[in-house]
Image: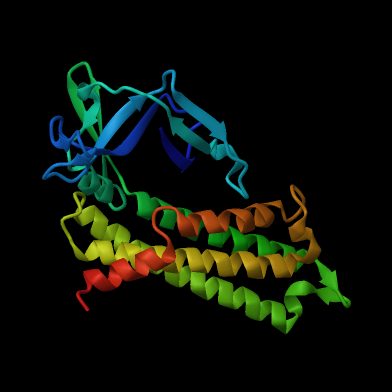
């Protein structure tokens, strides 16, 4: 039995692309139950939903529409034709996923290739949501009155808005730089992009976390109420940790960037 935790979209999925440890037939020592002159290798398998594939929905802090599931494979058999890529090279293909993913679609013998930047997509989401925090905070501070004047007229609030804007725009500029380089190198041949995407992901999610917190302070108690005037801020505040974790947590990204810089 194999268990997979926090599989995004697991409740709705008909197929599960799974990295599995595989050993060639006849390479094990049956008397001891251990591999003989062979170590388990990672192979990507496309597993179809079938009896033995059990999914259970997980209650999440945020991302309610993601249908995230706890997945169990119990006595599931997979035909060799469902191997994705080459056997034993699943780890390499998985690592490609985080910076450049290749999805292959076959339709009427036509081969379509769609490139998807996973971490870059997370970065775009984080920067976009940071802008939402700034915009919502500005609109609210211009309409809310305290002590006889608009909230935005208080120096402390103006400083918050200025800091939020500065961090968000700096992040957006870095994003534009990386986006342009990705356009010039659609297949990811520029090795320095791995480092910059990793650093930018950390910077973008930390910026979003800062902006969500500051916007929450500007809205005050309203930001603790779902679906109200500060409903967007309340939701972003819950979702920000997911953006910081999936696709590579901050610590992994920082370590990756330093390794890529060969320091």
Between 154 and 72, the residue placed more toward the observer is 72
Horizontal side, residue 45 vs residue 220: left or right: left
Look at the image and tell me whether residue 86 can be seen: no
Q: Nearer the viewer, residue 98 or 174?
A: 98
- Dividing the image into 4 quarters, which one contains the N terminus? top left
Image-quadrant location for residue 85: top left
Q: Position of residue 80 (x, y in %)?
A: 20, 24
Where residue 177 appears, x then y in whole percent? 31, 65
Labels in figure, total? 0
- Quadrant occupied by the C terminus: bottom left
The residue drawn where x is 63% and y is 58% is 237
Which residue is at the front of the view, 214 or 99? 99
Residue 27 occupies quadrant: top left
Residue 230 in percent (x, y) is at 73, 56
> Which residue is situated farthest in the top direction here?
108
Q: How is the image coloured?
A: rainbow
Q: Residue furthest left?
A: 37
Q: Residue at 61% of width from left, 64% of height from top?
A: 212
Q: Position of residue 38 (x, y in %)?
A: 14, 44
255 versus 222 height, above or below: below
- Left or right of 236 on screen, residue 45: left
* Residue for point 17% across, 36% down: 28
């Amino acid at each position: 039995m194999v268990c997979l935790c926090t599989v995004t979209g697991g409740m709705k999925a008909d197929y599960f692309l799974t990295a599995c440890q595989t050993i060639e037939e006849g390479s094990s020592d049956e008397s001891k139950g251990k591999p003989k002159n062979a170590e388990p290798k990672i192979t990507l398998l496309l597993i179809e939903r079938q009896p033995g594939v059990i999914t259970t929905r997980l209650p999440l802090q945020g991302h309610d529409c993601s249908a995230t599931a706890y997945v169990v494979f119990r006595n599931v058999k997979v035909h060799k034709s469902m191997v994705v890529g080459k056997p034993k090279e699943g780890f390499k293909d998985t690592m490609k996923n985080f910076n450049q993913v290749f999805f292959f679609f076959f339709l009427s013998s036509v081969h379509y290739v769609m490139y998807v930047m996973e971490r870059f997509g997370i970065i775009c989401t984080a920067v976009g949501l940071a802008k939402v925090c700034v915009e919502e905070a500005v609109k609210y501070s211009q309409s809310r009155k305290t002590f006889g004047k608009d909230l935005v007229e208080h120096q402390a609030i103006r400083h918050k808005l200025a800091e939020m804007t500065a961090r968000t725009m700096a992040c957006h500029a870095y994003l534009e730089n990386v986006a342009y380089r990705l356009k010039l190198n659609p297949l990811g041949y520029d090795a320095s992009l791995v480092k910059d995407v990793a650093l930018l992901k950390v910077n973008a999610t930390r910026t979003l976390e800062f902006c969500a917190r500051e916007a929450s302070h500007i809205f005050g108690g309203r930001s603790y109420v779902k679906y109200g005037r500060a409903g967007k801020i309340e939701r972003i505040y819950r979702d920000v940790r997911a953006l910081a974790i999936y696709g590579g947590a901050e610590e992994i990204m920082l370590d990756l960037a330093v390794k890529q810089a060969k320091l």
